[in-house]
Image (cartoon, rainbow, N blue to C red):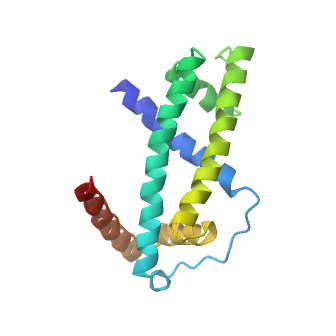
């Protein structure tokens, strides 16, 4: 159970890290927050991208675990170091060795590069660009009726995917 909590925390952090790395240098288009401006076809594409991202996340977790095993570092220590790096106000009580720092940086760099490429390919495969994805995401967060429509589309796609497996 502890492992799942740590894995979930890492996964969320990883997605945030990958998302922020992917978004650097990108111009933001004007936000279209009205639910009416998001078609059902776009919601289906958005849901497909989200499901693909979840799959990428699971694959990335396995890869990180493998990389950590090769470097003889456990997931808990890796997460502790990551969290301390993200919080500049945290006291430096972890005593991170130079080798640990190098390992964490190497894994972060590798995963960011791979994630960026895979995310770009996911957008391409689903015929959606990052700016429109982000606009839809903001609209879903701010509009309860659109959020409800999105949940329905996600459930339909997950059920359809479940029957295909």
- Give the vertical position of 3 relative to 96 (above or below): below
Between 158 and 34, the one nearer to me in the picture: 158
Residue 159: name its quadrant.
Answer: bottom left
Q: Position of residue 41 (x, y in %)?
A: 42, 78
Residue 40: name its quadrant.
Answer: bottom left
- Report the side of 106 relative to 15 (left or right): right
Between 165 and 110, the one nearer to me in the picture: 165
Q: Single out the residue that lies furthest toward the bottom.
A: 36
Q: Where is residue 148 in the image (x, y as percent from the top left)?
A: 34, 71
Q: In which quarter of the image is the N terminus?
A: top left
In this view of the protein, can residue 86 be seen by the observer? Answer: no
- Report the side of 104 relative to 62 (left or right): right
Image mark count: 0
Q: Residue at x 58, y 58 (%)?
A: 121
Q: Which residue is drawn at 45% across and 86% down?
A: 36
Q: Where is residue 118 in the image (x, y as percent from the top left)?
A: 58, 51
- Report the side of 61 relative to 22 (left or right): left
Q: Where is residue 101 in the image (x, y as percent from the top left)?
A: 71, 22
- Give the vertical position of 59 relative to 26 (above or below): above
- Give the vertical position of 20 relative to 77 (above or below): below
Q: Residue at x 26, y 55 (%)?
A: 162
In this view of the protein, can residue 129 be seen by the observer? Answer: yes
Q: Which residue is drawn at 54% across and 59% down?
A: 122
């Amino acid at each position: 159970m502890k492992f799942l909590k740590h894995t979930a925390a890492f996964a969320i952090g990883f997605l945030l890290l990958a998302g922020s790395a992917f978004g650097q240098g990108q111009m933001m288009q004007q936000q279209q927050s009205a639910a009416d401006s998001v078609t059902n076809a776009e919601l289906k594409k958005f849901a497909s991208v989200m499901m693909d991202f979840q799959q990428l996340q699971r694959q990335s977790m396995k890869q990180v675990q493998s990389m950590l095993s090769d470097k003889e570092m456990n997931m808990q220590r890796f997460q502790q170091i990551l969290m301390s790096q993200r919080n500049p106000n945290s006291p430096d009580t972890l005593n991170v060795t130079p080798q640990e720092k190098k390992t964490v940086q190497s894994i972060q760099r590798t995963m960011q590069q791979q994630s960026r490429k895979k995310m770009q390919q996911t957008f391409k495969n689903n015929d959606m660009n990052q700016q429109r994805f982000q606009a839809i995401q903001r609209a879903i967060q701010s509009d309860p009726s659109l959020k409800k429509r999105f949940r329905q589309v996600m459930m339909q796609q997950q059920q359809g995917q479940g029957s295909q497996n």
